[in-house]
Image: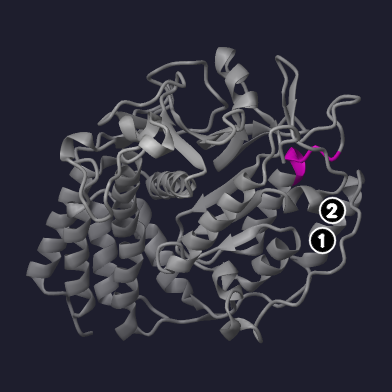
Amino acid sequence: MPVSHDVMEIIRVLDEEGFGFLASELLAEVTLGIELDLDGGEADLEGEANTEAAEPAPPPMVDLGEDDLRIQRYFDADGGKGGPPPRYEGISEPDQLAFAMEFLRLRLVEPIKHLAEAEQLASKLVGDAATAPAAERPEQPEGEALPAEKFVRIAFTSHPLGEPLPVDTRVAGSSVEAEDLAEVLQRISKVKA
Amino acid sequence: MALPAPLVADLRQMLRRFGAAHGTATVPTAAGKALEAWLIMSLAHRAQATGRWQAVLCKGDAQPLPPAGTFKLPGYQAGILPSNPNGPGFVRIENIADPSISLELHGGLQWKGRSDATHECDVSLLPSYIATPLRIAGGHPRGLPIVAYECKDRTISGNPDEMRQTLARMFDLALVTLPYPGWACRMFEAATHRKWGRHLKRYLWFFGTGAFGIVRVGPFSKGAGKLGRHFRIGLHGNIYSDPRTITQIERKFVEVIDSIDAVHGI
């Protein structure tokens, strides 16, 4: 399915604004389409509603012992030789823009929102809250915001011999820029082709 | 039909503002690191919430992080680095009833396998008994972690090759064959010869004790599921979209750490 003019414009904007790696991923995923044969993962294996679709019981354990050649046969048995290749369905041009916006939400907005949440969780694990015995630990009522001065910031170290990572100027525990970006993505997703 | 120009202008402005505030988001590996950080803090918080464990953020010198400090995670693969207050930290998780059961939750930690190859585990758990001596001069823990998760920030579905990669890593790490005569253990540290945990003769038994999995933003292909389930590697897809995913990971994590005993480990 050819990539729509709208999505190509989004890809160009991403590339020009310093997100070239996302531009190429988005182009690849829109071109590839949506995979049809997905596994529900662990979440889908729980619950009565999924009983009929549950995976069959695993085969009896085989003693793989110390023979690495037998391990290799387990790799070979599953694939690349057996089973059909994955099937994909093209994304229609009217749906491509919404697909692109969801892609950007998952790749840009959600990571930052979850990093902010990680900082909020981290902030509850320091100072008095961390070192006091459980019975004496000060209670932080659910839903009550920590004072801003107590927020822990999470940062990533650069390799001493490599390029230093770009500096973050964000406020620890905050994801306001991500939320503002999400609002723009939402508006774009509603544009009719 | 072209997108309205004002909307494109808004998108440009927001991307610039976003990139300025979150410089690391412009680096390809950034989203994976954010997922790693969130997973580590979620697990630590969940352990503490049980009332049986105390989770403490530690700096690179193993001292508690002060309030409003900066908790550093490695942005690159490395073993445990020599003690350094400015180096990457970890989360210490200690059993309240028996503080001798002390664990460390690390991000981006490299482990060394039987082949001598190093393997990065995005999130891994090991006992302080093994980690502490490594912090003297630096080094790699050897053997199979108690818990290990791979974090994949890609939205495209995880294919069987991704699962095979994880499995190959675990095969190299699992000490089914003894590293040295008489060294029957789950993991060890080479400098001081400390050994920890039970030795198991079968890979599936090793993989079944502990928690291992791939955590993905996107879903999994069917082929990946078949391989992962047989070898006890959890498939945790749609981590941001499906709240059940993180709940399951947290529940399994607590189940595993609760099963550790002071004498035999796990």
Q: Secondary structure at mark 2?
A: helix
Residue A72, numbered label? 2
In this view, the residue farthest toward the left is B6
Q: Is residue B203 above or below residue A101?
A: above
* Crowd class of label 1 (few under 14; some 14 to 19; many from 20; radius 10 Å): few
Q: Position of residue B31 (x, y in %)?
A: 39, 50
Disc 2 marks a residue whose amino acid type is: Gln
Q: Is residue B74 visible?
A: no
Q: Position of residue B184 (x, y in %)?
A: 85, 32
**Start-end of magenta stretch:** B171-176
* Crowd class of label 2 (few under 14; some 14 to 19; many from 20; radius 10 Å): few
Q: Is residue B218 visible?
A: yes
* Cα distance in 3D space between marks 2 and 1: 6 Å
- Seen at 23% across and 40% down, the residue is A172
- Please say whether residue B153 is one of the residues in the magenta stretch: no
Chain under numbered label 1 = A
Q: Secondary structure at mark 1?
A: helix
Disc 1 marks a residue whose amino acid type is: Asp
| Same subunit, tags 2 and 1 | yes
Q: Is residue A5 above or below residue A78?
A: below
- Please say whether residue B172 is one of the residues in the magenta stretch: yes
Residue A76, numbered label? 1
- Seen at 48% across and 49% down, the residue is B50
Q: Position of residue B168 (x, y in %)?
A: 72, 48
